[in-house]
């Protein structure tokens, strides 16, 4: 973590980013997936806040027959994120389960159910909720921003506001509003997608391992 330099008049602020919620709500099928989260957070916070910490919650994807290199692209992006001094990456996991599911329009006497495989991401929402409450209890921040529209976060947001009297601002990456999230948060806004083009990492970066580049596939939608 870089040395902390705070403006006494600004609120020390943490940002909690639901990585998949952000990806599917704002980044998927866009050329803006090489997102510099620090730059985006600074634009979201504005002059009344000092960025203290970014917690980014995700899970490692695995290659699939239709996309054999998505894990490599994700690892490259996480490598880019780790060049930011404020960021900490917290990982959940993917679970594959097979279930028998009823058909919407079953064929009478022939086929009533079908076996499907479901891939579910586990842990990100729980991890985000846990760190939000823990950081509030330890007074790690004076204000929090949550970049997600997952209604599973309603109760921890309400808890932080009511128990610790700390503001929690929600920014939804999705274009549809959540009334439950809006009711729980200190403020609720939709992410301005026009910010994304100006919040991109340089194409080429370097870390302690050496230089690396933006995945070329991300130049197209």
Image (cartoon, rainbow, N blue to C red):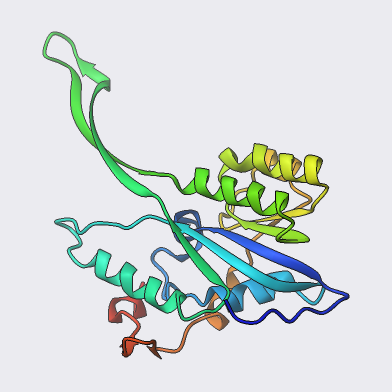
Q: Where 109 falls versus 194 (above or below)?
A: above
**Image location (x, y in percent) of residue 220:** 34, 77
**Residue name at image x 62 percent, y 68 percent:** 53
Q: Where is residue 194 in the image (x, y as percent from the top left)?
A: 60, 74
Residue at coordinates 46% horizontally, 65% vertically from top-left?
A: 27
- For the residue pair 83 and 30, the one nearer the viewer reads as 83
Residue 120 found in image quarter: top left
Q: In this view, does 205 lie to the left or right of 132?
A: left
Count of number-bearing discs: 0
Q: Residue at x 52, y 79 (%)?
A: 84
In the displayed structure, does residue 79 sit left or right of residue 188? left
Task: Check the image and report above or below for 5 versus 21.
Answer: below
Q: Position of residue 124 (x, y in %)?
A: 46, 49
Residue that sits furthest to the top in the current view: 109
Q: In which quarter of the image is the C terminus?
A: bottom left
Indicate the quadrant containing the N terminus: top left, top right, bottom left or bottom right: bottom right
Residue 158 at least partly seen: yes
* Farthest-out residue, right: 9
User: Which percent across, then down, holds residue 21?
Assistant: 49, 54
Q: In which quarter of the image is residue 179?
A: top right
Q: Nearer the viewer, residue 187 or 79?
A: 79
187 in relation to 35, above or below: above
Q: Which of 81 and 221 is in front in this view?
A: 81
Judged left or right of residue 122, residue 105 is left
Is residue 106 left or right of 183 when viewed as pictured? Answer: left
Does residue 19 appear in the picture of this structure?
A: no
- Residue found at the very far left of the displayed protein: 110
């Amino acid at each position: 973590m870089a040395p902390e330099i705070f403006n006494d008049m600004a609120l020390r602020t943490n940002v909690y980013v639901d990585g998949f919620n952000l990806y599917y709500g704002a980044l998927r099928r866009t050329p803006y997936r090489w997102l510099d989260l620090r730059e985006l957070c600074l634009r979201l916070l504005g002059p009344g806040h000092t960025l203290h910490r970014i917690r980014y919650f995700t899970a490692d994807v695995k290659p699939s027959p239709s996309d054999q290199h998505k894990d490599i692209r994700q690892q490259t992006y996480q490598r880019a994120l780790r060049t930011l001094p404020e960021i900490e990456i917290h990982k959940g996991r993917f679970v594959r389960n097979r279930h028998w599911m009823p058909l919407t329009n079953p064929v009478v006497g022939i086929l009533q159910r079908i076996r499907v495989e479901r891939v579910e991401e586990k842990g990100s929402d729980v991890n985000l909720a846990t760190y939000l409450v823990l950081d509030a209890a330890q007074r790690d921040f004076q204000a929090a921003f949550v970049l997600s529209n997952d209604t599973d976060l309603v109760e921890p947001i309400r808890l932080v506001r009511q128990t610790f009297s700390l503001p929690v601002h929600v920014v939804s990456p999705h274009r549809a509003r959540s009334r439950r999230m809006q009711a729980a948060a200190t403020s609720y806004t939709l992410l301005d997608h026009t910010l994304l083009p100006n919040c991109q990492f340089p194409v080429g970066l370097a870390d302690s391992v050496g230089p690396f580049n933006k995945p070329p596939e991300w130049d197209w939608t």
